[in-house]
Image (tube, rainbow, N blue to C red):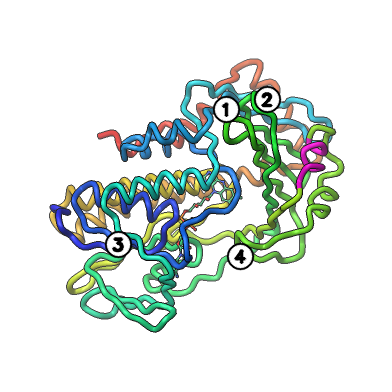
Amino acid sequence: MSLIGQSVTVLGAGVAGLAVARALALRGAQVTVLEQADAVREVGAGLQISPNGAAVLRALGLGAALEAVSTRAAAVELRDGPTGDLVTRLDVAGAGYHFAHRADLIALLLEGAREAGVELRLLQKIEAVDLTGARPGWRNAQGGTGETGLLIGADGLHSQVRRALTGKVAPFFTHQVAWRALIPESPGVPNVAEVHMAPGQHLVSYPLRGGRLRNIVAVEERRTWVEEGWSLRDDSMDMKLAFQGFSPRVRGWLEQVQDVWLWGLFRHPVAREWFRVTEQGAAVILGDAAHPTLPFLAQGACMALEDAWVLADALATHDSLAAGLAAYQAARASRCTRIVEAANTNARLYHLSGLARGVAHLGLRLGSVVAPQAALRRFDWLYKHDVTAR
Ligand SMILES: Cc1cc2nc3c(=O)[nH]c(=O)nc-3n(C[C@H](O)[C@H](O)[C@H](O)COP(=O)(O)OP(=O)(O)OC[C@H]3O[C@@H](n4cnc5c(N)ncnc54)[C@H](O)[C@@H]3O)c2cc1C
């Protein structure tokens, strides 16, 4: 299906929305992005972009921009939280793993979308999506309405488009919370992602922006409920107290934390229905709107990038909207479900306690002596998958 001149409306200017907007505009579509915020901005936090995500940025012509704003990872180290002892080290130098500031990734995608001719409209909070008419329609917070031929829901965790497709789904609290913070770092520190693990807790940290900043995500199991969202601030003392049993290295980082955000971790099912064809149009979802994930494999943004490429490619290479969208869902649903499930499993592994913890750590230590790269090869299906290769 030729996309030249096709009018497309994308809801949401996050990773998924900006990436799919560029991918479609490069193929000739006329793309408008509606974003609720008054500016495209991002929270202060880091992102790991693994080779499967980086492949999409390269295919979108943004490889040089990615290299300019990110740092290439040299290794991943798993460490015992209380002692700081190394459990195992995975050498990833040359494998194409990047550390990036979220704001830098969003800025490069925004520039990429604009350069491809995408129109961005801010202050467009969509309050309801209607898929019962001939064409997908919506109502915004000011009471204005609109409709389009192809509506793409890249509107994240609380997606209005997903709600119109599948109804409201109640997520469940995992009884885990994540603090995230940035602290200053000294340029020249090794480009290593460190995971410090203890029963019921773990902390991930890596340098950003050429080593001038350090990203920290600290996860703890707890009984009390915490809101799901990016904007809830917490007292940095709570985080320091929670991790006071960790090694001096980790405590030293936490001493420097000033601003900290707290995020309740919820599990959401992967959407059953990713698209609907109406009489004269269609609606489809991607990214967190379709498959929110726990952050324990660092794949949410990478999946969003993969979705964006596959969706644009499927539409361009099939005869009709219906065939293209069916091919997109078929290509993505099982892979995304597998990734979401693998992230759930990682949460359990990092937080083991007692005998299970001892056995798992011993296994990892032995593995790093006998077959250091075997642990990484287990994830070839994930990181070595290139959705842009045909
Ligand atoms: C602590 C943490 C660490 C993470 N680390 C990593 C990592 O290392 N690697 C990785 O790949 N992923 C990571 N992720 C996941 C990743 O950030 C998300 O999966 C990714 O940002 C999803 O992108 P998205 O575009 O689908 O949604 P979002 O980024 O949520 O974007 C949605 C956009 O839609 C807009 N919007 C929402 N509703 C409306 C509406 N009604 N009307 C108009 N606009 C609307 C929003 O304002 C926003 O701009 C992490 C997540 C967390 C919380």
Work out whether residue 57 or residue 222 is closer to the camera in this orientation and state it.
57
Residue 273 appears in view: no
| Residue 254 percent coordinates (x, y) | 78, 42
Mark number displayed over residue 88:
2
| Residue at 60% in and 19% down | 372
* Residue matched to label 1: 375
Q: CA distance from mark 3 to mark 4?
A: 34 Å
The reply to whether discs 1 and 2 touch (Cβ–Cβ < 8 Å) is yes
> Which of marks 4 and 3 precedes in the sequence?
3
* Residue matched to label 3: 32
Mark number displayed over residue 172:
4
Q: CA distance from mark 3 to mark 1?
A: 43 Å
> Which of marks 1 and 3 precedes in the sequence?
3
Q: Secondary structure at mark 4?
A: strand
> Which of marks 2 and 3 precedes in the sequence?
3
Q: Quadrant of the C terminus?
A: top left
Q: Quadrant of residue 359?
A: top right
Task: Give the side of residue 34 with respect to residue 260, left or right.
Answer: left
Q: CA distance from mark 4 to mark 1?
A: 30 Å
> Which of marks 1 and 4 precedes in the sequence?
4
Amino acid type at mark 2: Thr
